[in-house]
Image: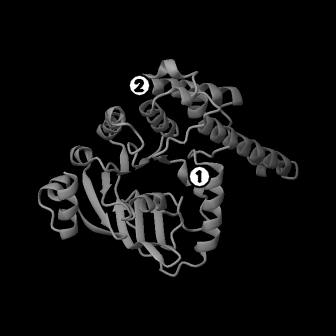
């Protein structure tokens, strides 16, 4: 079963292995963390053997920002994005989310990922589950998991209270939901989100029967079902036919207009110019230039950026 972030079981296993392998190898000391930043990376480095994909990057993302990452293929854009939720474990450096160091093995990474929605290039929907089940799987799993934890805590409190005096007995944690209620709430929220994107009539169908644009919108809705504080998009339109790109970008624009914090790797320059509050240009594993869209697209300073824009605009 996928976890709350709808990552595949294989990806989770790889992530855990890499975290165990690299967490002890990090040498860069932790610097003071900006309390206002939602995401902060410090001296982020990622290597694959002798190949350095990310080279000592320090960056911050603040609540409400829409950060577009552009640049040539192989520049490290997707790797940087995947490091933000430690789907790719940094070789060195640190990643903070709401002040929590995601590179610290003491931090429950799955708990943090609940608030970080991730949308991939290749939809990653379960073809053996209908659309409604795809969307409700994570919230139901998390809800039931939290319910079981609370019940276990109460069981332990009851046991300990048997040996405590009346004045020292501890109260139980309140339980205001049930398995049935968790499932009903998840389904109602899923239908609300499907109605929003005009696909409520597809709730009972399977992903393989849908168009690419429909599947990607459902993948976005699936991430939204966890009520994330930030959305990470890894080239969400790259696998779509040109005529389907617009419907996906329109949904992302709506989220941006509503104030959702987002970081999006994209090759859609028009979208980046229109929606982003800040644009990062990445090349050779570094952020070569960044600034508001008007500056990046209208008055680029970096020679590599100017060359890149001359080819894509």
SS at circle 2: helix
Q: Is residue 220 left or right of residue 313?
A: right
Which residue lies most toward the top here? Answer: 201
Of 286 and 71, the residue lying toward us: 71
Quarter of the image that includes the N terminus: top right
Residue that appears at 79% across and 48% down: 157
Q: Which mark is residue 111?
A: 1
Q: Which residue is farthest left?
A: 299
Residue at figure coordinates x 35%, y 63% from the top left: 60
Horizontal side, residue 182 vs residue 281: left or right: right
Marks 1/2: CA–CA distance: 27 Å
Residue 122: x percent and y percent? 49, 44
> Which residue is found at the position 37% from the left and 59% from the top?
37
Crowding around mark 1 (Cα neighbors within 10 Å: few <14, some 14 to 19, many 20+) is few
Does residue 172 appear in the picture of this structure? no
Residue 5 to residue 283: above or below = above
Image coordinates of residue 38 in percent, x first then y, are: 40, 56
Q: How many marks?
A: 2
Q: Which residue is mark 2?
A: 196
283 versus 217 height, above or below: below
Residue 85 located left or right of residue 174: left
């Amino acid at each position: 079963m996928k976890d709350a972030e709808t990552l595949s079981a294989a990806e989770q296993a790889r992530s855990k292995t890499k975290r165990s392998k690299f967490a002890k190898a990090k040498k860069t000391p932790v610097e003071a963390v900006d309390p206002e930043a939602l995401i902060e990376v410090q001296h982020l480095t990622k290597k694959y053997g002798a190949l350095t994909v990310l080279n000592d990057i320090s960056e911050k993302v603040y609540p409400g920002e829409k950060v577009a990452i552009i640049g040539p293929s192989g520049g490290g854009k997707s790797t940087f994005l995947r490091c933000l939720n430690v789907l790719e474990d940094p070789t060195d450096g640190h990643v903070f989310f709401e002040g929590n160091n995601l590179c610290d093995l003491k931090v429950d990474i799955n708990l943090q990922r609940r608030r970080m929605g991730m949308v991939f290039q290749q939809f990653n929907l379960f073809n053996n589950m209908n659309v409604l089940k795809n969307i409700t799987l994570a919230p139901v799993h998390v809800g039931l998991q939290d319910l079981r934890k609370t019940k276990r805590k109460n069981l332990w409190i009851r046991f300990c209270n048997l040996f405590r005096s009346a004045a020292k007995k501890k109260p139980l944690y309140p339980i205001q939901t049930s398995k049935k209620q968790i499932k009903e709430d998840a389904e109602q929220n899923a239908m609300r989100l499907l109605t929003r994107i005009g696909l409520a009539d597809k709730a009972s169908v399977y992903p393989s029967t849908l168009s690419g644009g429909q599947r990607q919108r459902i993948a976005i809705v699936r991430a939204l079902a966890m009520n994330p504080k930030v959305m990470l998009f890894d080239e969400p339109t790259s696998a779509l036919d040109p005529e389907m790109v617009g419907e996906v970008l329109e949904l992302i624009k709506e989220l941006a207009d509503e104030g959702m914090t987002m970081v999006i790797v994209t090759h859609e320059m028009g979208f980046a110019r229109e929606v982003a509050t800040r644009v990062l240009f990445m090349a050779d594993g570094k952020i070569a230039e960044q600034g508001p869209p008007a500056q990046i697209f209208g008055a680029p300073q970096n020679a590599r950026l100017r060359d890149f824009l001359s080819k894509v605009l």
